[in-house]
Image (cartoon, grey):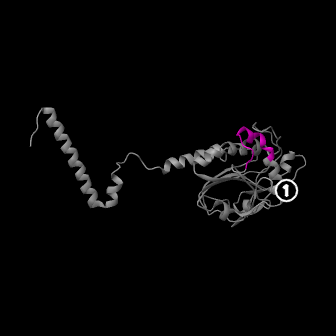
Amino acid sequence: MWTIGALSAAAVRLPACGSKPSSSRGSPIVMATMQAEQVAVGDDFPNVPITLVTDGCAAEDNCPLLDSSTDLFSSGRNVLVGMPGAFTPTCTDEHLPGYIRGAGKFRSLGVSTVAVVTTNDRFLLTAWKRAMSACLRAEGKASLDGMVSMLADKDADLIKALGVAYNSKLDTKANKFFQLNAGIRSKRFALVVEEGRVAHVAVDEGETDLDATSAESILAWLEERGRASRPSKTRSALQPTLEAEGPGKAAWGAALVASLVGLVASQEGVVAGGGLSF
């Protein structure tokens, strides 16, 4: 089912990498776009064409065109992060750097792929990747490849299939970095996809708000999910075996354990009394 979605655009200045973006906002610009209903937990991940932007592929015109579900998210545990656009302040200075810093932690929690998608073309994403060099050097890395996969959804096919698109009107008075991304853009969202099915959905409304979709928030959710899936350590190691054998053998096993406990207790009493009895 297709619905109308809308979001407000804002104008802010682009700060230096790693600093907080300005909180000043321009007048809201609200437009609408046709798209699917917003993705929800339990949904199958949609399968649409998406371009993977690797180092040098834009200039050589050989960026891989993949199927979003079949090639990227059909198996294992994966994270997809949507951002409003390349070079926009929060994306550049907080959101993407957080996932760069957390790449190793995501791998340790069983995440096979962390991918970032915007509605930019492969050329703009390539330039953005290069602009992140300072943040990469801080992590001792030379490239985003192998840490975070960058996906170019130029025609917004994936974004609209997920129901997280909005339309930003070109405004010459707004911040110039937002105007690089005027048109259909992605809401700021993060999905955890397990075996091709959506397990977690987070959305931050607004151009500069960053909370539920941050790397820290998604890592916290994954850690909590890991704790919840661990078996309880308070049960006896014998208990699962007894339960598997059925109620009859379970009762017999419990009686055997009780008898052994009683025998040990009686022998301790005899030793304490200084003699043995038969």
Foreground pick, 115 / 84? 115
Is residue 107 shown to the viewer in this render?
A: yes
Foreground pick, 93 / 272? 272
Residue 128 is situated, as x and y percent measured from the top left of the image, at: 80, 48
Horizontal side, residue 219 vs residue 57: left or right: left
Residue that appears at 84% across and 46% down:
177
Residue that appears at 18% across and 44% down:
263
Graded by Cα atoms within 10 Å as few (under 14), some (14 to 19) or many (20 or more), the crowding at tag 1 reads few
Foreground pick, 109 / 278? 278
Q: Quadrant of the C terminus?
A: top left
Is residue 209 shown to the viewer in this render?
A: no
Residue 89 is situated, as x and y percent measured from the top left of the image, at: 79, 43
Does residue 92 belong to the magenta stretch?
A: no
Q: Quadrant of the N terminus?
A: bottom right
For the residue labelled by badge 1, is the local secondary structure a helix, a strand or a loop? helix
Residue that appears at 74% across and 51% down:
83
Q: Amino acid at mark 1?
A: Ala
Residue 31 is situated, as x and y percent measured from the top left of the image, at: 81, 56
Q: Which residue is mark 1?
A: 59
- Quadrant of residue 169 within the rendered picture: bottom right
Horizontal side, residue 197 vs residue 128: left or right: left
Q: Of all residues shown, which one is farthest toward the right?
A: 172
Residue 179 is situated, as x and y percent measured from the top left of the image, at: 86, 50
- Quadrant of residue 217 within the rendered picture: top right
Q: Is residue 17 above or below residue 232?
A: above
Residue that appears at 38% across and 45% down:
234
Read off the magenta span: 130-144
Q: Of all residues shown, which one is farthest toward the left?
A: 278
Q: How many marks?
A: 1
